[in-house]
Image: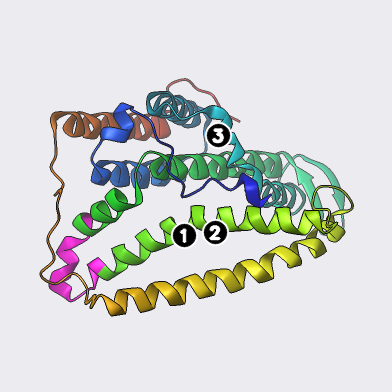
Amino acid sequence: MLRDITIGQYYPSDSVLHKLDPRVKLAGTLLFVVSLFPYTNMTVYLITTLFLILMVTVSKVSWRYILKGLKPVMIIIFFTAFYNVLLTPGKNEIATWGIIHISYVGLRKAFYMVLRLMYLIIGSSLMTYTTTPTKLTDGIEEALKPLNKLKVPVHEFAMMMSLALRFIPILMEEANKIINAQSARGADFEEGKFFERAKNMVSILIPLLVGATRRANDLALAMDARCYHGGEGRTKMKPLKYSKRDFAAYVIICAYLVMVLLCGHYNFLHINM
């Protein structure tokens, strides 16, 4: 399962989405995530689905790679749907056993909740697939720059985000090495019952945690040895600048939001579920 984690990793490509300013992608991702929650009708989710498909197509990121990133969180999605179906009472109940209520309301709620979780993960992952950690750090820092006036350590926050994202592929590589080493010693992570495989994962997680702690300590010592003192007075080799395509992207995002708001209020297609 650890091998399937792709969230936070960069997918190199020469697409329009890769070339956009990171501030545009941050704003677009935030607004896309927010647009998933206010409404529960199929008209809105049809528009959301088409918009997400368009963004993935433009990004040139493989659908197989994107769906691979959903595998580690499928257990969370499953339990979310399971509990919503069984524990949501409502009219027109299909079956009832004590506190367990299976109703059309529960089925509807579970359906939308699963869609939200999947779209949220795909949408937020698409931002990291198309943005290098350095650009993402610069984008976060520039977007939060007004908070400097309130004495908020924006640069330090952006630096922490960058380091966390940089550590993901390193930890995945180390996890693969540990898995191969443990497999060579006879450990089985693919077969057997769920609890047996979970027990075998301990032999991966403990050395991975130790390695991550050691790497973090080495990084802190290296930054201290180089007299790192935060963002005050620092300059950038490539400062962020908006281009025409960035403004065009903002227009597309605004158009998407307007369509969601209109369809959410009026449900033009009259699709209810």
The stretch of residues the image draws in magenta is 143-155
Left or right: 15, with 79 as reference point: left
Which residue, given by chain and number where applicable, does mark 2 sit on? 171
Please tell me which residue is depicted at 23% across the width and 67% down the height of the picture: 155
Viewer-nearest residue: 46 or 89: 46
- Real-space Cα distance between discs 2 and 3? 18 Å
Which residue, given by chain and number where applicable, does mark 1 sit on? 167
Q: Secondary structure at mark 2?
A: helix
Choose the circle earlier in sequence order: 2 or 3. Answer: 3
In contact (CB < 8 Å): disc 1 and disc 3: no
In contact (CB < 8 Å): disc 2 and disc 1: yes
User: Is the residue marked by circle 2 packed among few (<14), some (14-19), or many (20+) residues within 10 Å?
Assistant: some
Q: Secondary structure at mark 1?
A: helix
Taking the image as drawn, is residue 36 in sight? no
Q: Secondary structure at mark 3?
A: helix
Choose the circle earlier in sequence order: 1 or 3. Answer: 3
Residue 199, image quadrant: bottom right
Q: Position of residue 168 (x, y in %)?
A: 50, 56
Residue type pointed to by label 1:
Phe
Label at residue 257: none
Residue 232, image quadrant: bottom left
Please tell me which residue is depicted at 22% across the width and 60% down the height of the picture: 144
Q: Is residue 142 above or below residue 218?
A: above
Residue 253 drawn in magenta: no
Which residue, given by chain and number where applicable, does mark 3 sit on? 65
Taking the image as drawn, is residue 146 in sight? yes
Q: Position of residue 12 (x, y in %)?
A: 40, 35
Residue type pointed to by label 2:
Leu
Residue type pointed to by label 3:
Tyr
Which of labels 1 and 3 is toward the front? 1
